[in-house]
Amino acid sequence: MKAGCYSNRELSWLKFNGRVLEEAADGSVPLCERLSFASIFQNNLDEFFMVRVGTLHDQMLFSPNLRENKTKLNAEEQIAAILAESRELCRKKDEIYFELMKELQEKGGVELIDFARLSEEEAGYLEEYFNTEIRPLISPQVVGKRQPFPFLKNREIYAIVDLDSKGSGKIGIIPCNNGLFDRLIRLRTDSNRFMLVEELILHFVPQIFDHYKVRSKSLLRVVRNADLETGEENILDEAAKEEHEPDYREAMVELLKRRKKLCAVRAELSRSINDEVVEKLCEHLDLRREQVFYTESPLDLSFVFPLQDCLRTKPELFYEKRVPQKSAMIKDDAPMMEQIAKKDILLSYPYESIQPFLRLLNEAAGDPEVVSVKMTLYRVARYSKVVEALIKAAENGKEVVVLVELRARFDEENNIEWSRRLEEAGCRIIYGLDGLKVHSKLCLITRKTKKKIQYITQIGTGNYNEKTSTLYTDYSLMTASTDIGLEALMVFNALSLGELCEPTKHLMVAPNGLQQGVLRQMDEEIEAVKKGGRGYIGAKLNSLTDKVLIDKLIEASQAGVKIELVVRGICCLNPGIKGFTDNITIVSIVGRFLEHARIYIFGAGKRQQLYISSADFMTRNTTRRIEVAVQVESDVLRRRISQMFGKMLADNVKGRLMKSDGTYIRRQPRKNPVNSQEFFYEQAYCAAEAAEKERQAKAAGKKQAGKAGKQAEKSEKQAGKAGKQTEKSEKQTEKAGKQPEKAGKR
């Protein structure tokens, strides 16, 4: 049945996070990096509950009969499945965590301890530390008739205590991370033994609540809904209608304040505590008992990162250092715009550095012939060199138009601040369209020379963020194509007018042209097979959820089109189902770097058309966002991206193969292990080294030629000097010959 071709979006995402957890358990991964993966797993799960479970929670309340369009589960059924799967994943996480900490002590000499393993001297030191450094800064509270239950902040840790006073029970609560003291407490300056501050506070709660008997105690952490989208659009759209655009920005500020107070979707406890306390907790937080999790590992694993700093002298516990390399396509001694005018240039992050793009922006800021710079910003670095270049361009009198997407989830505050800075510098700020996020990665530089108007266009798959360009795999295409430049101008003009861009030839622009363009290309591959030819579809994506595109992929598979997909995260399509998805192969790569680039390939050989894009095959990307895909026209760049795609498909170290039941299996590398990310980095190092050698050889050649030229010039001068000397000698000889003649005449 065709229904077996689909997987539920939320459960598929949990499988992805399970693959992240597998990296924490993988003995071939260096120890400190495995700790990082455990922390990443936990952070991922938090954000999943904050966003996806939060959305389902709202749906369960307001649209309980609504069913998702693939597996037909309603919100309540999905939440029940999510809770069950999450509980199992958290159990595995606890097991992996304690194995990692044991190994950390053995290999690194670093230990996170509890009071059961303290010496008498250490216990005395911690008690003194608590009394002098911690107790004066904490604010305990007893919940009662006159003391209401306090608001528990999202993802912060609290000590919660079951208190007995004259036979009646009360609840004591203490915030454990108020930002006033360090979370990791070192036992001695020369020691690598640590204790978490929340464990220290919890241990001494009898001293804090000394008028009560402590019956049970635990640490508590609450995860709150962060999904504002249900009501945010109405609020933001109303703000956008106001006379002054900053009203929209201020409306976003207010929404962020509101997010902090949204309902709880999960609670975690570090220990068993009186059932009565749990009931009161659930009542106050409006949670069901199944939304309460018990965990044996610390409630927040982010402490592993400062812990790693103690181990920097042990390089074997970390990944081999990798540095983004200079692109072999780029020369240091020529302006970027001049080089792009000669050929299209592709940067592949993190293997190649983002510096050439930053160079391009700074050159544009200072070029007297550049009249405008237009750009879309979704997520940028906290100390963004990209934004600094745009500010510099505006201060130099260029027209700078920046579309800042304030709704980039969890980056809103950063974007709000940068939008203010850009505006103060004289940039024109746009906040996007009603109901549509602008997720495209598009930059257009316009130059006006005496001869013509020139466009330099950059289209990317990832954000303009210098930090993530070293951690995420992405592509950045820079081209001087007039056709692409004019179409990019159409996109910016439409955005400036608050309109949607109409379909174009070289760019596929969502929401009006991307899904339709992809469907058209897939239909051409189906038609090619019907005519007796070969049909091919390849794609690299973060997620695949768009049912319209999924159904077209199933149709193409049934027609005999070969389909190869690299999907890192959510994948709602199951491959290998007889009669439906027999011709589909799906690989997921989870490794050192976050796979983020999007590639679409249609056709093979001379028929091949290849795009890079900001858009996944997700309904939100194809129908509810402004996204841009660009056709790669250069044969050289097309071959390069195709070869990289092939290497990713062949990855048998970090690549997992998806089975027809939606599960994933690790491939077993035999004689030739292929780790695509490491392979691409080696390629980048080799290409950069070869380019540097070539540069040095040319420089040496020029130097040698210059030296030879100077030697020849010297020889010529010497020859000239010798010639003059000969001429002088001849004149002297001639003069000497005339002397006897003169004497005879006398």
Image (spheres, rainbow, N blue to C red):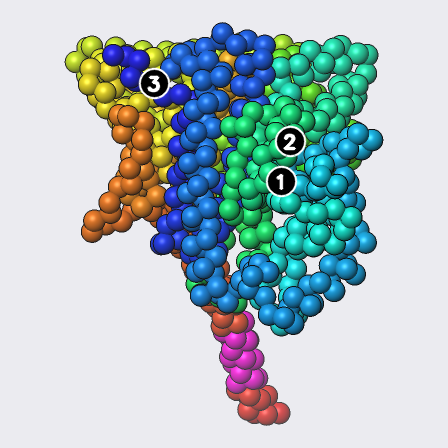
Q: Nearer the viewer, mark 3 or mark 2?
A: 2
Q: As shown in the figure, which amino acid type bears the numbered disc 1?
A: Leu
- The residue identified by callout 1 is 220
Name, please, the residue furthest toward the front.
Answer: 167
Q: As shown in the figure, which amino acid type bears the numbered disc 3?
A: Tyr
Label 3 SS: loop
Label 1 SS: strand
From which residue to which does the magenta span run?
A: 716-735
Q: Nearer the viewer, residue 167 or 28?
A: 167
Q: Nearer the viewer, residue 37 or 271?
A: 271
Q: Residues within 10 Å of mark 3 (few under 14, many from 20)?
A: many
Q: Nearer the viewer, residue 66 or 732?
A: 66
The residue located at (71%, 39%) in the rendering is: 167
Asked whether residue 717 is drawn in magenta, I would say yes
Q: Earlier in the sequence, mark 3 or mark 2?
A: 3
Q: Is residue 260 above or below residue 742?
A: above
- Whole-percent x and y of residue 287? 59, 25
